Amino acid sequence: MMPETALNIGGREYRVACNPGEEDQLQQAAALLDTEAQSLLKALGRVPETRMLLMSGLMLADRTTEIAIQAQALQKEAQSLKSRLREAEDRVATLSSQASAAGNGADTAEIEEARRTAEAAIATLEAATLRVERMAAERRA
């Protein structure tokens, strides 16, 4: 038998069955829907139940779509940064080999510049990764 959970959305109570162990997740989803419903009620006053639920769902879907678009853009940025990082690492390796073969420090400045470029790419990639992780956490919340 599936457990039944009481959900309060827009000042109305709904009883919904769910799989065992999914009650907390269902409550969290209902809380998101309730937040949107409450903002509608404040803005519009009394709203028919079906309209309130439809508009609340659409508002959540719109936010979800926006987050997905942002995540996609960040993933593209991360791929570009990974590519730049690989190029910088390859440049550092090439310059290091050339300096070793020449047996002098003539290319030291160029090697250091390539290392700084690689480090900057790493820092930017890490920042992009943190933004994606933060967005994912916000989406789950």
Image: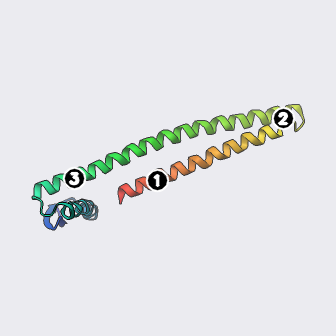
SS at circle 2: helix
Q: Is residue 47 left or right of residue 135?
A: left
Crowding at mark 1 (Cα within 10 Å: few <14, some 14-19, many 20+): few
Residue 22 x, y percent position in the rendering: 26, 61
Residue 84 in view of the camera: yes
- Separation of marks 2 and 1 at Cα, in angstroms: 40 Å
Residue indicated by mark 2: 99
Q: Position of residue 5 (x, y in %)?
A: 18, 66
The residue type indicated by label 1 comes to: Glu
Q: Which residue is mark 3?
A: 57
Which badge, 3 or 2, comes first in the chain's sequence? 3
Residue that carries the numbered disc 1 in the rendered image: 133
Q: Amino acid at mark 3?
A: Gly
Q: CA distance from mark 3 to mark 1?
A: 24 Å
Residue furthest right in the image: 104
Query: Dot 3, crowdedness within 10 Å: few (<14), some or many (≥20)?
Result: some
Give the quarter of the figure containing the N terminus. Answer: bottom left
Q: How is the image coloured?
A: rainbow
Is residue 1 at all visible to an observer of this figure? no
Quadrant into which the C terminus falls: bottom left
Question: x, y percentage for residue 64?
Answer: 32, 49
At horizontal 35% and vertical 46% (from top left) the residue drawn is 66
